[in-house]
Amino acid sequence: MRIVNIRVNIAPYAVYLDIFYRWFKIENEKIILSNFP
């Protein structure tokens, strides 16, 4: 039961992490592209 509860509690954070990771990747690509001459 505890494992199920932990998974349920982590689920919302996993969504936020996924959104943040995608945003971070996009921002990283922008920074890398802007560094090219």
Image (spheres, grey):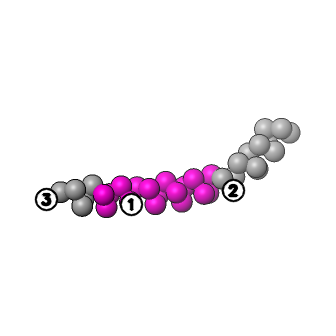
Q: Position of residue 30 (x, y in %)?
A: 31, 61
Determine which of the numbered discs, if any, sits on residue 26 in the image: 1
Left or right for 8, reference 21: right
Q: Position of residue 22 (x, y in %)?
A: 46, 58
Q: In this picture, is 36 found above or below 4?
A: below
Please, what secondary structure does the residue beneath circle 3 have? loop
Q: Amino acid at mark 1?
A: Ile
For marks 1 and 3, the one nearer the N-term is: 1
User: Could you say which is closer to the camera, residue 30 or residue 5?
Assistant: 30
User: Where does the N terminus fall, quadrant-wise?
Assistant: top right
Q: Amino acid at mark 2?
A: Pro
Q: Main secondary structure of the magenta part?
A: helix
Task: Tell how many labels.
Answer: 3
Viewer-nearest of discs 1 and 3: 3
For marks 2 and 1, the one nearer the N-term is: 2
For marks 2 and 3, the one nearer the N-term is: 2
For the residue carrying disc 1, how many other residues have a C-alpha within 10 Å: few (<14), some (14-19), or many (20+)? few
Q: Residue at x 76, y 50 (%)?
A: 8
Determine which of the numbered discs, if any, sits on residue 2 in the image: none
Residue extending farthest to the top is 2
For the residue carrying disc 2, how many other residues have a C-alpha within 10 Å: few (<14), some (14-19), or many (20+)? few
Using the rendered view, name the quadrant where residue 7 is placed. Answer: top right
What are the residue bounds of the magenta stretch? Answer: 14-31
Left or right for 10, reference 35: right
Determine which of the numbered discs, if any, sits on residue 12 in the image: 2
Q: Residue at x 30, y 58 (%)?
A: 31
Q: Is residue 9 magenta?
A: no
Q: Is residue 23 magenta?
A: yes
User: Where does the C terminus fall, quadrant-wise?
Assistant: bottom left
Q: Position of residue 19 (x, y in %)?
A: 54, 60
Determine which of the numbered discs, if any, sits on residue 37 in the image: 3
